[in-house]
Image (cartoon, rainbow, N blue to C red):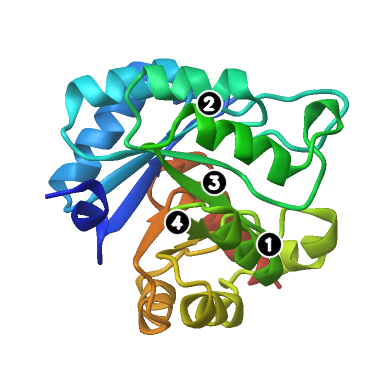
Amino acid sequence: MNVLDKIKGGLIVSCQALEDEPLHSSFIMSRMAKAAMLGGAAGIRANSAQDISEIKKTVPLPVIGIIKTVYAESPVYITPTINEVNALAECGCEIIAMDATNRLRPGGETLADFFRKVRENYPHQLFMADCATYQEGMDAAVMGFDLIGTTLYGYTEETSQARNDITPNYQMISELVKNSGKPVIAEGNIWTPEQLRLAVRCGIYAAVVGSAITRPMLITRRFVNAMKKDEV
């Protein structure tokens, strides 16, 4: 069974912890991945070569790999340069995801120019486009990305108004499913099984859920805030 068949119709669990979070540890992320697998996950999304290597020792599931790196001259931080792509390919990621917004990358490089070089270097690698808008998803499909994700909706200046929205962009998901010609991965703002079911009804290929499953600090904060809202 190939990689895309393995994740089709499945839930991909994002196992990530930032450096300032208590669970920041490659070992802990590998155990998160094991728990996700035992719960029925079809794949794992993870950040950093260290975490991915440890996860791949622990579970046999396909991994969507990213490396978050901040460069001063660009807002793009999800797999922004060829250095991150090389590191992800070296640690055996079945799928490499990257920022596929229309923002310039480090060095002033466009996504089209960058991805052309990446594809030449890795013609058989699967690549996922992390997009913020419908048009970016369509553009990424034309460039040759293998999967289109809604990951960055709400995380760019153009879509920043959506940061206060707690639901996925179902319209964007549906239109990409209908028109992109690529497997569409729903990712972002999926907090409940009900929201996930609505995304499934849009015809998605698979879905990524992270914070609602693997980030207990954020989960706790949501419950605490809910209690405060009911205060008289």
Residue located 67% across and 31% down the image: 80
Q: Label 3 belongs to which residue?
A: 218
Asked if residue 206 is positioned above or below residue 119 in the image, the reply reads below
> Which label belongs to residue 147?
4
The amino acid at mark 1 is Glu
Residue 229 quadrant:
bottom right
Label 4 element class: strand
Q: Label 1 belongs to which residue?
A: 136
Q: CA distance from mark 2 to mark 1?
A: 20 Å
Which mark is first along the chain, 3 or 1?
1
Residue 106 locus on image (x, y percent): 79, 28
The amino acid at mark 3 is Leu
Q: CA distance from mark 2 to mark 4?
A: 16 Å
Residue 227 locus on image (x, y percent): 58, 63
**Other-residue count near label 4 (Cα within 10 Å), few / some / many at <14 / 14–19 / ≥20:** many
Residue 51 quadrant:
top left
Q: CA distance from mark 3 to mark 2?
A: 29 Å
The amino acid at mark 4 is Leu
Q: Label 2 belongs to which residue?
A: 85
- Can the viewer see residue 25 in this picture? no
Which mark is first along the chain, 4 or 1?
1
